[in-house]
C-alpha cells in the first residue's frame, strides 16, 4: 500500500515569494496534519484537518494557510517567505485523530524548503 | 503549556547492548503515546504506539508506559549500528494534536 506522499521533495525560494506544498494521505485516512521541523528540534505543529475541517492550528503567523480537498489530500501555503521559514515540512495522516487507537500518525517523506 | 521532555543525548551504547530512551510529559490527561525513529535528513518513522500502562513489545523494541509517574520509555534490545538515529517521543491528550519532544540521539558503536 502506498504511504503518505508529498511534493515537491525539495524547493528553493527567495524571500518574499510564496510556496505551495502538497500531501496525499494513506488511502482511507481522513486526517492530515502539517508540521515544521528545523534542525535539532522535534516537529512543530502547524495545522490539522479532519474530514475537510480545520481541527487545530499551531502558533504560526497568518502567512501560513492550508486546506483539505474532498479526496482528503491537502495543501500548505506559505506567503511572504522569510529566511526563518527554511525547514523540513512534514505531512502526517491518520484514520481519525480524536480516538485513541486510530490516532496514530504516519509521516510522508517531507519537503525540504530553502529560502534564500 | 503541554510539554514533552527528552534528553537530547547523544546516548552511546555498544552493539548488542540494551538502549533505554526516556520521555516525560506534563499533561496528566494524555491518552496516546508514540515513539518515532528519524534518520538524519529523513522523516519520522513510527516504531510503535502505546495507550495503556505497562509494557508493549514489538520485536526488539519495548515501550513502557507509567501514567502515574508521567513517563514513557523505549527499550531497544540487541542494539545494532543501524539503530543509530534520533528517537522522537510524541504525546497526545484529549485534543487532536500530539506534542513532540526534541528527540534523543542514539549512537550504537560496533
Image (cartoon, coloured by chain):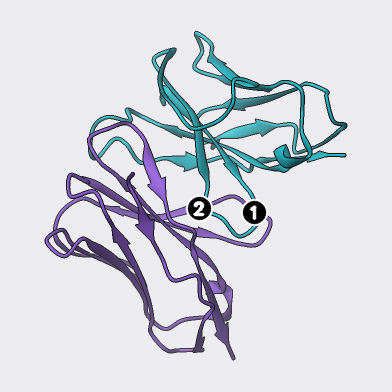
Chain colours: A cyan, B purple
> Is A2 drawn above or below residue A61 in the view shown?
below
Q: Residue at the location (55% across, 83% down)?
A: B108
Residue A104 lies left or right of residue A13; in this view the side is: left
Residue A90 lies left or right of residue B62; in this view the side is: right
- What is the chain identity of the residue bearing mark 2? B
Q: Is residue B57 visible?
A: no
Q: Is residue B74 visible?
A: yes
Instruction: Tell me whether circle 1 and circle 2 mark residues in contact (CB < 8 Å).
Output: yes
> Is B24 drawn above or below residue A38 in the view shown?
below
Q: Which residue is nearer to you in this view: B33 or A40?
A: A40
Give residue B45's mark. Answer: 2
Q: Which residue is mark 1?
A: B42
Q: Which residue is nearer to you in this view: A51 or A41?
A: A41
Residue A69 lies left or right of residue A77; in this view the side is: left
**Quarter of the view holding residue A89:** top right
Between the C-alphas of marks 1 and 2, the distance is: 9 Å
Q: Position of residue A48 (x, y in %)?
A: 45, 26
**What secondary structure is found at the residue carrying circle 2?**
strand
Same chain check for tags 1 and 2: yes
Viewport quadrant of the C terminus of chain A? top right
Give residue B62's mark. Answer: none
Q: Residue at the location (57% across, 18% down)?
A: A66
Q: Position of residue B62 (x, y in %)?
A: 29, 69
Q: How many marks?
A: 2
How crowded pointer 1 is (Cα within 10 Å; few <14, some 14-19, many 20+) is rated as few
Residue B17 lies left or right of residue B32; in this view the side is: right
**Outermost residue toward the top in this view:** A70
Q: Position of residue B85 (x, y in %)?
A: 56, 68
Q: Residue at the location (76% across, 22% down)?
A: A80
- What is the chain identity of the residue bearing mark 1? B
> Is B76 drawn above or below residue B68 in the view shown?
below
Amino acid at each position: 500500500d502506498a504511504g503518505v506522499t508529498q511534493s515537491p521533495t525539495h524547493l528553493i525560494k527567495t524571500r518574499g515569494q510564496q510556496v505551495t506544498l502538497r500531501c496525499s494521505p494513506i488511502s482511507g485516512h481522513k486526517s492530515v496534519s502539517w508540521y515544521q521541523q528545523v534542525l535539532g528540534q522535534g516537529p512543530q505543529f502547524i495545522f490539522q484537518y479532519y474530514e475537510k475541517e480545520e481541527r487545530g492550528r499551531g502558533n504560526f503567523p497568518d502567512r501560513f494557510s492550508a486546506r483539505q480537498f474532498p479526496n482528503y489530500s491537502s495543501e500548505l501555503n506559505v506567503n511572504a517567505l522569510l529566511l526563518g521559514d527554511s525547514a523540513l515540512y512534514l505531512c502526517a495522516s491518520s484514520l481519525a485523530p480524536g480516538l485513541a487507537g486510530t490516532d496514530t500518525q504516519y509521516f510522508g517523506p517531507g519537503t525540504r524548503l530553502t529560502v534564500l | 503549556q503541554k510539554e514533552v521532555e527528552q534528553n537530547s543525548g547523544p546516548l552511546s551504547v555498544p552493539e548488542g547492548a540494551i538502549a533505554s530512551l526516556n520521555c516525560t510529559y506534563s499533561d496528566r490527561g494524555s491518552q496516546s503515546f508514540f515513539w518515532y525513529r528519524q534518520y538524519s535528513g529523513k522523516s519520522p518513522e513510527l516504531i510503535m504506539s502505546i495507550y495503556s500502562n505497562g509494557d508493549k513489545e514489538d520485536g526488539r523494541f519495548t515501550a513502557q508506559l507509567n501514567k502515574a509517574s508521567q513517563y514513557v520509555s523505549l527499550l531497544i534490545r540487541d542494539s545494532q549500528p543501524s539503530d543509530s538515529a534520533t528517537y522522537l517521543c510524541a504525546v497526545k491528550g484529549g485534543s487532536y494534536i500530539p506534542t513532540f519532544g526534541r528527540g534523543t540521539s542514539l549512537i550504537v558503536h560496533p
